Image: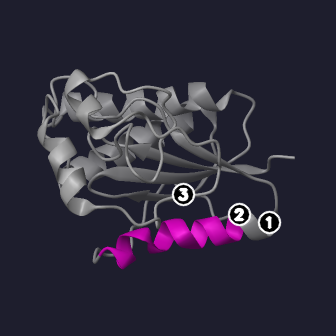
Amino acid sequence: MVLAYHLILSFYGFWLPNDERGFWSERVRKYELRQFGPATRVKTRRSLADKPFDPIRREEMRYVLKHNPVQVNGEQARLVAAGFAYASAERDYTVHACAIMPNHAHLVFGRHESPIEKIVEHFKSRATRQLNVADINPLPRSPWSKGHWAVYLNSTEAIHRTIRYTENNPIKDGFKRQHWKFITPYV
């Protein structure tokens, strides 16, 4: 039984459909990206973030995108967090951990009656609204990539492990630990 979710939301340009590590899309929609091969569809729920990849190829892929890949700064990250907090309050999502990185975000939250796809759109839309209201959205549209990566957590151990992973995500990339007021500790 699903007890919680680990949700990874990518900003535009972070994880492309033909990334060597895999992707959730079944096709490459952007013509210019097709030169780098077909979509690398995966069915696993396990994280592939630590799988090796060619950074030069990745940069070549990003170069052909319509917009520059999104990299949020500290002020933008705080607005994304405010959007996540707003969504959580609106629908009573119990968020146990959150890390907002320059190119993606992690959320660990408890089981909810809404389908995960609706929850994803809710988090993304509220975060985008906050960026738009402050007039610092890095794109003229939503800064998010389509889709999401959701891992279903079905044990207390998995939840604790994923919370630790999420909390340590900024630290491993050289940033400070993040503390958000909308977080509810997992008991």
Across the whole image, how many numbered discs are drawn on residues?
Answer: 3
The amino acid at mark 3 is Ile
The amino acid at mark 2 is Ile
Lower sequence index among marks 2 and 3? 2
Q: Residue at x 49, y 48 (%)?
A: 8
* Magenta stretch, overall SS: helix
Q: Residue at x 50, y 38 (%)?
A: 148
- The image shows residue 149 at horizontal and vertical percentages of 54, 43
The numbered mark at residue 159 is 2
Q: Residues within 10 Å of mark 3 (few under 14, many from 20)?
A: some
Per the model, the C-alpha gap separating discs 2 and 1 is: 5 Å
- The image shows residue 169 at horizontal and vertical percentages of 43, 69
The numbered mark at residue 183 is 3
The amino acid at mark 1 is Thr
Task: Please check the rendered image and state whether residue 65 is part of the magenta-colored stretch, yes or no.
Answer: no
Dot 1: element: helix
